[in-house]
Amino acid sequence: MNGAYERHLTGRRVEVVTVWFGYVLSHWRGPRMPRFSSPLVSAWNPVLAQGLTVDPSSPAPYHDELWCDRWIAEALLYGRKPYGAFTLPAGEALSWFDKSGGTGLVYHAQSAGDLVRVVAGTADSYGRLFDLDALIADYREALPPELAEPEMAALDAHRSQSPALDYILSENAEVLFTQAPLSVRGLTLGYPPRETAARIAAGAAA
């Protein structure tokens, strides 16, 4: 059994489980955010990009230390993720550069011995990539006003900006990315806003 499975809970909440050959890789609960959807956003993105598993002793798809990096690289090429960082052997990185031509991806690369670290993202604006009006409306309902309003304002301010312009081509781009509001970071990485909203709420309660 493979897939991402969700179940509606009481109180406008949802439970999501990702499963690989019957083994649970992730399990979380968050608010329902029914308006927003995007092919660039998936419950699998945070799982496979970070090598998540509920039980480290159980089988998992991560065959070697670069498995997640290769997955991120492929997800970027095939439009399953708008932004990401990965490290590959030099030969694989060069092949990725060749394949990325014409995809609208912008990247910054730095070699370190036999490996190349790449930060890549789409040049399209957030306003073209995503239905931000739907996402903002979902955040308005999912979080208390004092938590929702800063995230809504940040998303609205990113309409004409892009992952490439803000978080690859800008000076200190990666530092700026780590400082961006969680709603923007999660969306840029292709993570489900429901999961991001749950993190925002949990952080405020801590």
Image (spheres, rainbow, N blue to C red):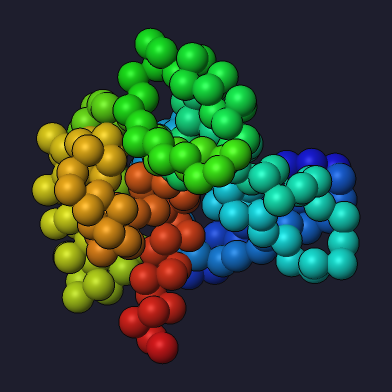
Residue 23 left/right relative to 25 = right
Identify which residue, 181 or 36, lies in the foreground: 181
Q: Residue furthest front?
A: 113
Asked if 98 appears above or below 113 in the picture, the reply is above
Can residue 37 be spotted in the picture? Answer: no
Instruction: Return the x and y of residue 126 as percentages of the image width and height.
Output: 24, 36
Residue lying at the far bottom in this picture: please name it.
206
- Residue 169: % across, % down: 22, 38
Q: x, y percentage for residue 49?
A: 58, 48
Task: Assign the N terminus to one quadrant of the image.
Answer: top right
Horizontal relation, residue 40 to residue 122: left or right: right
Which quarter of the rendered picture does the C terminus lie within? bottom left
Q: Is residue 88 above or below residue 192?
A: above
Compare residues 89 and 76 and report the one nearer the observer. Answer: 89
Give the residue drawn at x 55%, y 60%.
14
Residue 131 position by quadrant: top left
The answer to whether residue 14 of the structure is visible from this angle is: yes
Coordinates of residue 150 in the picture (x, y in percent): 17, 65
- Left or right of 181? Residue 48 is right
Residue visible at 73% across and 57% down in the picture: 25
Q: Residue furthest top?
A: 102
Number of numbered discs on residues: 0
**Residue in the image at 44% along x and 68% along y:** 198
Residue nearer the viewer, 79 or 89: 89
